Image (cartoon, coloured by chain):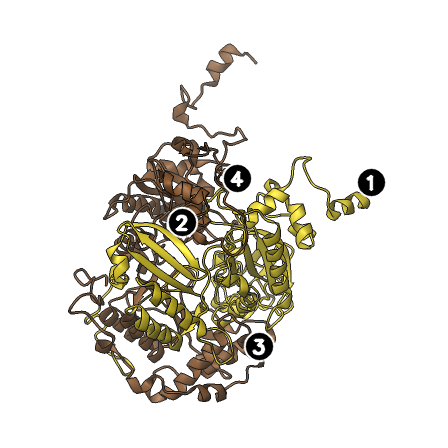
Chain colours: A brown, B yellow
Amino acid sequence: MGIPGKEKMWDKEEKEHRKYDDVRIFTDKDFNNYTEDELKAFKPKHATPMLDELEKGPWPSFVSDLKREALHRHKVGQDNLLIPMEAVDDLLGVVELSYKEGETHWKHGGIVGVLGYGGGVIGRYCDQQQMFPSVAHFHTIRVNQPGAKFYNTDFLRAFCDICEYRGSGITNMHGSTGDMVMLGSTTEQLEPIFFDLTHDLGNDIGGSGSNLRTPSDCIGPGRCEFACYDTLAMCYEMTMAFQDELHRPAFPYKFKFKFDGCPNGCVAAIARSDMAFIGTWKDDIRINQEAIQAYVADKIPRDGGGMAGANWGPFNIQEEIIDRCPTGCMTWDGKKLSINNPECSRCMHCINAMPEALRVGKDTGVSILFGAKAPILEGAQMSVLTVPFMYAKHPFESQQALARKVQDWWIEEGKNRERLGELIQRMGLKTLIEVLGIPAMPQMVKEPRSNPYVFFKESEVPGGWQRDIGDYRSRHPK
Amino acid sequence: MSKGRLGYYNPDKKQENRITDIGPSHFRQFMPPVLRKNYGNWASHRVLDPGLLMHVSETGDKAFTVRVGAPRVMSVEHIREICSIADKYCGGYVRWTTRNNVEFITDKEDTAKALKKDLDSRKHIGGSFKFPSGGTGNSITNIVHTQGWLHCHTPATDASGLVKAVADALFDDFKTMRMPAKLRVSMACCLNMCGAVHCSDIALLGYHRKPPAIDDDAVGKGCEIPLVVAACPLYAIKPVTTAEGKKTVTINQEKCMYCGNCYTMCLGLPLADKEGDGVAILAGGKISNRISGPKFSKVVVPWLPNEMPRWPTVVKTVKQIVEVYAKDANKYERLGDWAERIGWERFFEKCGLEFSWHLLDDYRLAYDTFRTSTQFKYTDHAWAVSKAVGGI
């Protein structure tokens, strides 16, 4: 929980910890209250012949799942629910209608939210309210997920109760940005939900609109040997440091932080975040020569065993590692692997391929990149490498200061709905580095510019730009 | 937690006992003991089986993870079933991955194997698996996606249903690890790309093809016209006053690229249209820095129709690309790296995809994507051009 001193509120390993039973809404009789035969025989309110086709096939069917929830709501009964019992029946109905008509039946949201916040809730209304009254109002609440989406079942069950009692019982686990998403509540229920989330779950809601969006992170040091910094701690601390920006819209548009522990990029920070933190190192790749021999002798499977589904033949270190290294910085003399580390660009290939023999360095930190966004409007952009290396030490104050500098610039100069990356495009990377007070480096570009149209600064040119035509004419008569 | 319409919330004293700005619950309390104990001390990992991972720490401790697929749209009944499983096998701990998979973690290999068996045995009444294990290594893991017709106002297609149909077709590859490298499929139901699918090996993208219909009344009453005009990236929208004196807008339809940015600003300009809407397929993107840098996905099929409920043409096309890639690419070669090696002309030829004028970029910086060299390979596409100019 974000409340200082209550970070272990749900911790099962602590003697005094909150349990599901302490906060539950439903009783045991509300659960496991239908049989498999009842589920088989269950007919939701609307016939859904097209959606029924999506119950077939092996991949988990969301339609089967929705039907199960529809039945459960019937079994729990309207007396025990604050959102219409038939919400999921009507949800199935409205989606079926879209399948028939090929068009959505959801309308724009109005401005809805909780007092003092300008984000975290997205208003949603159905445009066929007569046909589907139980989903006429069907708002979304984004709940800020815990780091790397770790949960215990006490917390999750409590979350489920509130989703079902004050919402439709349907969630997204998770939204694209990372939140736990509760679907299908009403304006009236927003404050009670927020009260219970904060008091009983000890958990805040997430971002939407022109806010900082809910930051997200990879599993990092929690379970990954590639983690070059503590993604979980940094994501948490940055989320806490920017609570005001997360809840109260003060930006030109959305802003995303994402935390990847290494250049493999499991949370896609480089493609999805305005400010991407990607783990890296500046010393040498650690080599275990004995384990290298084991790979060469095919005693350890390549790529951690992740390629075992096809027959790729015996492991060939020259062909698979040395020749594929993008910088050609590795050699193999038949016995020993050598790496010319200053030439390594840390692509991770050799480490991914031989994780039991090669490790990321020990002197680790983050690279920081700015400006990624999806295509709307100027086209898709990836983040630009701006800070090559920075130590990432708790409580991450230097990263916070950097983020604030960039955000202040963007708030000042950005146009309505202009992402940071678009501002960088419009005002130039040179302006960004001025704002950050950092020098230019060739690592910021794929290649130097091919046009020579350099906008020099007046101060760089001796004598400045204020010229005396008389002086010129004294040398060059008309 | 509270019961009753307003629960503990007192609308007369809105600020009473209000807690704000507390952020997310702290992650550490939710980590399984074996992960806490070895936090930051992991040494290596191995995929023991599709869907079963083993992580080894410096101390020799091991964590076993069973990864299962899940639809991102999930009922609380489904989550409660996940909780029961986590209680039974994992001391009540469970997590989700960035790609919507669910992971159960334990420090005992036997438990993990029993758990995997249990998970793979559970089926929905309709016959689909509830918790299929897989999605590790070079499998085709879970398809991340957006809301679609289930909950969004701007989609050009459904998300959950299309993904279900494609995931069914790729299911064997979720359960095995035969791909040359990781192959990530992602789906976004409109250009807004909540799913940010623009760097995926295969991306499915809902796409409108008709400019907005203009509801003069709604535009006049409900929209900030200057914002609507400014919202258009192609300057296609102009403010006008109708003969009856209504304030509204006109749209230069030739300029419109159907992005829907105006509709986001103004509910009087809907785009959704049964005939107009469909799905584009992009390919060859990646996020990872492994071997080659991150790359954008490129449009390889400009549009396919929405064929509810199971999108057979989209499914067939995806499957076609996947099969050719699986057969033709070298080990460690991502789809985009493979296409670049063999040449995009060969990619289109091998995958049996049409290359029409739609695939010639005409947006900003389009020239950068044109080939300005004489290095190319001959395919039927090339002969068709030679014939068209009377050259052969």
Q: Nearer the viewer, mark 4 or mark 1?
A: 4
Q: CA distance from mark 1 to mark 2?
A: 50 Å
According to the picture, the residue beneath numbered tag 4 turns out to be A319
Q: Do the residues indicated by labels 1 and 3 lie within the same chain of the protein?
A: no
Query: Sequence-wise, which precedes: disc 4 or disc 3?
Result: 3
Q: Is residue A243 left or right of residue A105?
A: left
Residue at image point 35% right, 36% down: A284
Residue at mark 3 shares a chain with residue at mark 2 = yes
| Residue at 52% over, 74% down | A105
Name which residue lies at 37% across and 72% down: B82
Observer able to see residue A121 = no
Q: Quadrant of the C terminus of chain A?
A: top right
- B273 or B41: which is nearer to us? B41
The kind of residue on which mark 4 rests is Glu
**How far across and down, in percent of the image, does residue A6 sit?**
18, 63
Q: Which residue is mark 1?
A: B391
Mark 1 or 2, closer to the camera: 1
Quarter of the rendering occupied by the N terminus of chain A: bottom left
Q: Is residue A384 above or below residue A178?
A: above
Q: Chain of mark 3?
A: A
Q: Are marks 4 and 3 on the same chain?
A: yes
The picture quadrant where one finds residue A295 is: top left
Image location of residue B359, percent across then percent down: 65, 51
Mark 4–mark 1 distance (CA, rounded to whole Å): 43 Å
Crowding near the residue tagged with mark 1, few <14, some 14–19, many ≥20 C-alpha atoms within 10 Å: few
Residue at the spot of label 2:
A274
Marker disc for residue A53: 3
Marked residue chain, label 4: A
